[in-house]
Amino acid sequence: MSVAVSLMGPTAAGKSDLALELARRLPFEIISVDSAQVYRGMDIGTSKPDQHIRDEIPHHLIDIRDPANRYSAAEFRQDALKVMEQISRRGRIPLLVGGTMLYFKALKEGLAGMPSANPRVRQKILDMASEQGWPAVHARLATVDPAAAARIHPNDPQRLQRALEIYEVTGQPMSEMHTGEHEPLPYRLCELAIMPEDRAELHRRISERFAAMIDAGFIDEVRRLHDRGDLDEELPAIRAVGYRQAWQFLENRITSQTMIEKAVVATRRLAKHQMTWLRSWNNVKKIDEPHIEQALKVLESTSILENNQLWPGICRPAPGFPGQEKGE
């Protein structure tokens, strides 16, 4: 059976930089597991690797969807499996990197058959949220599907709406629909997670990263999306952390300072949510910092690659792999 490696962790933990270092040691190709990096035109706010990096190290599932179109966990699983098979056929190893935990879960466990979107039920839920607020929707979900409500934050309208919609349409809690038989992942998977122990340091990184995004032109990036005229704040792409707050700023609904404060708070909340997911994850190998030697040691200890002819490349780039300079 082919092997794959996943690298998870909260936002701003250093996953992307560590992934690049790993790909320079082992013949990895990186698959983005990020629900915002799939969208074209959303580069700065999603910390996409630039073209120079993507020319050096192959990256997949980036810039595959227009922001006007939705992208689901089921679509991600289908696309990821296709790319993973292509990578394996080339004799290389898929390295799945990101922080969208629902995508990792969908890939690993599969997804039960979910009902299609029901416009009438969705509108009913939106009306409830408009009249009573999303916390009321969360409270309603907690009465019919406590397990799903425990996983979904009261300020996560997209997932709240979908979870309650599934119950209203099927009469069955979404959490129970995820516990049936699923198509197994046809890979031996080594799961690695960066779990920072210093929460204050992570918060500092989050604040500094958003400030750097602002300096790099993030507001202009969001302005270009806003000026298109065919996008709105209810689309998943625009609801992404940072983009929603910048959108509100561009519409003069909040000040620049409030935008920064709200974006940083939302990002910290996202990081906390990602850490909660990871604490309940089975068989994950954890490191506290994105150090290459720690990661390599964990990979070696799992023995997942010990019978793979590519493992000897651990101390140097594999022959012929992008990033190896002549004479190294």
Image (cartoon, helix red, strand yellow):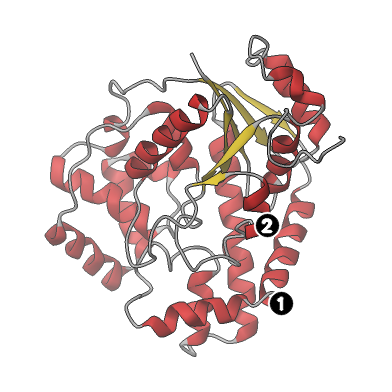
For the residue pair 72 and 307, the one nearer the viewer reads as 307
Q: Is residue 218 above or below residue 14?
A: below
Disc 2/disc 1 C-alpha distance (Å): 20 Å
Q: Pinpoint residue 99: horizontal percent, then vertical percent.
A: 56, 46
Instruction: Look at label 1 and name its amino acid.
Output: Asp
Nearest-to-viewer mark from 2 and 1: 2
Residue 258 in percent (x, y) is at 60, 80
- Residue extending farthest right: 327
> Total of numbered circles in the picture?
2
Q: Earlier in the sequence, mark 2 or mark 1?
A: 2
The single residue placed furthest to the front in the displayed view is 326
Classify 10 Å Cα crowding around label 1: few (below 14), some (14-19), many (20 and above).
few
Residue 234 placement: quadrant: bottom left
Q: CB under 8 Å between callouts 2 and 1?
A: no
Quadrant holding the C terminus = top right
The amino acid type, in three-letter code, at marker 2 is His
Which labelled disc corresponds to residue 52?
2
Residue placed most toward the observer, 287 or 15: 15
Instruction: Give the residue drawn at x 54%, y 30%.
Output: 280
Q: Which residue is mark 1?
A: 215
Instruction: Answer left or right for 45 relative to 202.
Output: left
Q: Nearer the viewer, residue 219 or 2?
A: 2
Instruction: For label 2, count other residues whose C-alpha is less than 10 Å away and answer few (under 14), some (14-19) or many (20+).
Output: few
Q: Which element type, helix, strand or loop, lies under badge 1? A: helix
What number is the disc on residue 104? none
